[in-house]
Amino acid sequence: MLSAKQAAKASGAVRVAVPTPKHAVYPRRRAWLLLACTVLVFAVALPFVTSIPAIKGFEMGGVNVVKVMGDLQYIPENAVMETLQPYAEQSVVMLPLKKIQADLEAIHWVDRAVVQRKLPSDLWITIVPQKPIARWRDQGLVNNRGEIFMVEAIAEEFLQLPLLDGERDALPEIMATYIELQQVLRNRGLGVLQLARTPRGSWQLKTTSGATVLFGQSEVVDAAQRFVSVYQFLGRGSENKIYDTRHNSGVAVM
């Protein structure tokens, strides 16, 4: 019989169960000592998925089958199992689904959880993972709704995401400016590597080519247009220079 980790590598799913004959039925008096528990983990096709960790089996009093569906790659090991353990002695009918949902959504990397009771004795859980599009300082990641979520450690593959910085209350403005600048730069073959908003409301941008751009408090998009025009005009050797757009009539290059 394949181990949980071998099964994950072979099929993209993990099935951990107490081995029993195909049609075995446990006597009622033994149910509290040995209850079958099946955990199925299905991989969600995301660009950054490389592997899915195995989830070890656990006993759930009154629950015969627990199905966990979703991408659990970055969820801390055993986090789902540990979250469900306090409810192990309750029957599926009495389980507080809203409370379980809230507990699951408090786990790192869980964006949303759907918990369903499937009578007579099944519990189905669907986990929707966070989708990071940027880093927030050195403390967390930003999802596709512009919300910060904290993680224990940022995986190496996400270190390539744009780095956003500024006061946390200014995150909506930072996200909006990031999206606008990304659009301007993308049209010229550039991208946002870092974007910071100062406490006074001015901006500093570092592009993927290495150029640093200074903006004032307003009309950032117009200033970005001036920058890319000057950047392309200078051509070769313009990558690692500083461009100060805080001049109404042009751009200072240093």
Image (cartoon, rainbow, N blue to C red):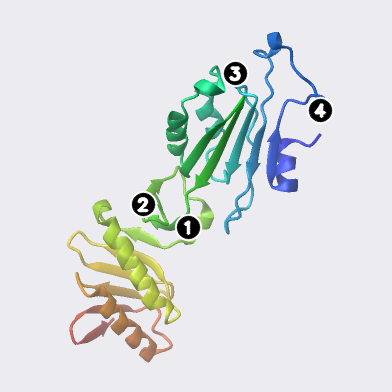
Which is in the foreground here, disc 4 or disc 2? Answer: 4
Residue occupying the point 61% across, 55% down = 45
- Which class describes the residues within 10 Å of circle 2: few (<14), some (14-19), or many (20+)? some
Residue type at mark 4 is Lys
Residue that mark 2 sits on: 147
Numbered tag placed on residue 61 in the rendering: 3
Q: Are marks 4 and 2 in contact (CB under 8 Å)?
A: no
* 174 and 36: which is toward the camera: 36
Residue type at mark 2 is Glu
Numbered tag placed on residue 22 in the rendering: 4
Residue occupying the point 36% across, 85% down = 231
Residue occupying the point 47% across, 35% down = 104
Image quarter (top left, top right, bottom left or bottom right) of the N terminus: top right
Disc 2/disc 3 C-alpha distance (Å): 37 Å
Residue that mark 1 sits on: 159
Disc 3/disc 4 C-alpha distance (Å): 21 Å
Disc 2/disc 1 C-alpha distance (Å): 18 Å
Does label 3 or label 4 sit earlier along the sequence?
4
